[in-house]
Image (cartoon, rainbow, N blue to C red):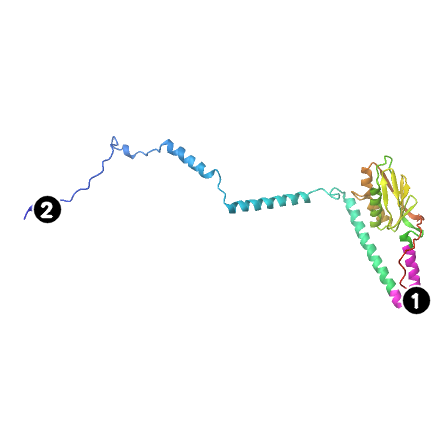
Amino acid sequence: MNNDENPRSRQPEQPERPEQPDDGPSGASDAPVQPPAAEEVSGRQRLLAGLWPPRVSRAQLIVAVLLFGLGLGLAIQVRSTSDDSALRGARQEDLVRILDEVDDRTQRLEDEKQRLDAQRTELENSSDQAEEARKQTLEKERQLGILAGTVAAQGPGITLTISDPSGAVAADKLLDTVQELRAAGAEAIEVNGVRVVANTYFSGEGGDIQVDGKKIEAPYEFKVIGKPQDLEPALNIPGGVVQTLEKEQATAVVERSEEIVVDALRPAERPDYARSSSP
């Protein structure tokens, strides 16, 4: 048998080792290899390219729009609530006076309720209900006559005198004065000899004012019957009638009195079609 064919006699073949580049002297291959400068620059460029331009998804865009709308709404609300009001710069004494006025109005309403309850009790308990009803009817007629301006009235109140040397006070300012007095509890009002009632109107411009078609001239004198402790503070509150007139270069003087006479009368008007339904 041929020895060349004996498998035991064969030597294992050694794998060929790849050729290594000549690294020079011994130990030179252990030094760290520095990357080329070109690769560092290209890496930064790739980072910038990944960040800009920004890639925003549709969901992120919707959330951003909703957050913007919410922020805008909050900003508008904060600005609207931070606006200066007429009472923000008021003094402590003025705020206390306004609070007292509100309390007085509440008390007047409570007194009126108690008075009506007392009248109802009198009607229910009176031995002569017919006579009691007649007395209350006459009293009610007198009260309605005062409101309608068909009878004279007297009582405590104030006198308001408005001087307008420049003729800048228009009709709407006088109407605002009447409304403020009514809100403060005025029961009868007269302006330069003209009785003010529910359907009274003011017209004209500064220096040419008419009340119910009758011309009046400055100074405008308001005779008002009511509680002076309520009427005067209502005119002097911050942003009220007195301050508004001062902005128009006019002056307003309020005087309290224990006896105010309102004797300007209006003719009693008869209705054309309405008739009483009582027998």
Check contact, mark 2 vs mark 1: CB within 8 A: no
Of the numbered discs 2 and 1, the one sitting upstream in the chain is: 2
Q: Is residue 89 left or right of residue 257?
A: left
Within 10 angstroms of label 1, few (less than 14), some, or many (20 or more) residues?
few
Q: How many marks?
A: 2
Q: The disc labelled 1 sits on which kind of residue?
A: Ala
Q: The disc labelled 2 sits on which kind of residue?
A: Ser
Question: Residue drawn 76% across and 44% down?
Answer: 92
- The dot on residue 9 is 2
Question: Residue drawn 43% across and 35% down?
Answer: 45
**Observer-nearest residue: 238 or 177?**
177
The magenta segment is: 121-144
Question: Residue drawn 94% across and 65% down?
Answer: 131
Whether residue 160 is visible here, answered yes or no, is no
Within 10 angstroms of label 2, few (less than 14), some, or many (20 or more) residues?
few
Where does residue 258 sit, x and y in percent of width and height? 91, 48
- The dot on residue 130 is 1
Question: Residue drawn 9% across and 48% down?
Answer: 6
Q: Is residue 259 left or right of residue 244?
A: right
Residue furthest out toward the front: 273
Residue furthest out toward the left: 1
Label 1 sits on a secondary structure element that is: helix
